[in-house]
């Protein structure tokens, strides 16, 4: 009697990539983007939509669990003929599906051929120089989830995780882009004012509930990473008003045209 074989994360990603290629008709995707709150309109700005696949049709993916996030995997043909895969079905750590599910989109993108991963989010500003509606490049992160997507004794170097070359490339499009350190908390509750002060003391500029685990998985898969946060609000204790998800959604909606324009100029320059 043969032993049952549990699928590894890489095998599941390879299976998902095969299904995406079959349903989209695109054999290889060159660049991948995960678009968080406020960044969704960028998908239509970077090229021609070739295919939209409901997330639940692809192995390992689920319909989006958060209002303001899409639930599709979109193939886009860029003006230079390359293809981008937009992952509109992000799984957050707080959904309780496990870290494998959180980074499945990134691993699938790598299996689909992407060598550059663009990770975006809506986040709270710890740095008092940031304003709501401002896009900020992620220069580094602090992972406060107490988890890692890497399993076993696989020691992955995270130096220059958020590629300095890609950040420089982004600034050729917009020289005013600021950058900062992103701190991932687990969520889904917003951070307390004390936690926000702590994030600032340990070197953080931005607080949010995504991205860091995905970036680690992207590096393990050999991809270059470009990260962006949209500052949707000042973080707790810095903001004088209580935080709300509605505020995040509204800030994202207002910033969408600017963000779409920014990414539509940066993405074609990416390797």
Image: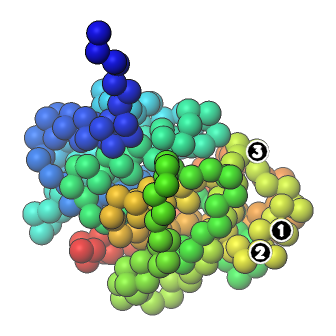
Q: Residue at image x 42%, y 70%?
A: 226
Circle 3 sits in a helix, a strand or a loop, which is it?
loop
Q: In which quarter of the image is the C terminus?
A: bottom left
Residue 202 - label: 2
Q: Which colour scheme is used?
A: rainbow
Q: Which residue is most to the front?
A: 1
Residue 47, position as x, y percentages in the image? 22, 60
* Rendered image quadrant of residue 128: bottom right
Crowdedness near tag 2: few (<14), some (14–19) or many (≥20) residues, C-alpha within 10 Å: few
Q: Quadrant of the N terminus?
A: top left
Circle 1 sits in a helix, a strand or a loop, which is it?
helix
Residue 205 is at least partly visible in this image: yes
Residue 113, position as x, y percentages in the image? 21, 55
Residue matched to label 3? 189
Asked if disc 1 and disc 2 are in contact, CB closer than 8 Å, the reply is yes
Residue 261 is at least partly visible in this image: no
Residue 194 versus residue 247 in the image, above or below = below
Residue 65, position as x, y percentages in the image? 54, 33
Residue matched to label 1? 198
């Amino acid at each position: 009697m043969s032993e049952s074989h549990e699928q590894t994360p890489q095998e599941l990603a390879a299976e998902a990539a095969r299904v995406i290629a079959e349903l989209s008709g695109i054999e290889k995707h060159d660049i991948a983007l995960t678009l968080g709150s406020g960044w969704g309109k960028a998908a239509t700005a970077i090229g021609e939509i070739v295919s939209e696949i409901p997330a639940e049709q692809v192995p390992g993916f689920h319909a989006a669990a958060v209002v303001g996030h899409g639930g599709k995997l979109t193939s886009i043909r860029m003006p230079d003929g390359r293809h981008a895969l937009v992952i509109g079905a992000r799984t957050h750590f707080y959904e309780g599906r496990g870290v494998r599910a959180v980074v499945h989109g990134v691993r699938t993108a790598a299996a689909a051929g992407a060598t550059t991963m663009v990770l975006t989010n809506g986040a709270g500003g710890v740095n008092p120089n940031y304003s709501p509606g401002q896009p900020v490049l992620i220069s580094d992160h602090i992972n406060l989830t107490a988890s890692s997507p890497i399993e076993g004794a696989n020691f992955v170097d995270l130096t220059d995780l958020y590629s300095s070359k890609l950040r420089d490339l982004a600034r050729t499009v917009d020289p005013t882009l600021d950058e900062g350190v992103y701190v991932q908390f687990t969520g889904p509750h917003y951070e307390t004012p004390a936690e926000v002060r702590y994030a600032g003391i340990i070197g953080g500029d931005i607080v949010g509930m995504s991205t860091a685990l995905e970036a680690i998985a992207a590096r393990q898969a050999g991809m270059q990473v470009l990260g962006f946060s949209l500052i949707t609000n000042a973080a707790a204790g810095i903001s004088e008003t209580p935080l709300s998800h509605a505020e995040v959604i509204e800030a994202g909606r207002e910033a969408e045209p600017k963000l779409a324009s920014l990414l539509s100029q940066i993405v074609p320059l990416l390797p």
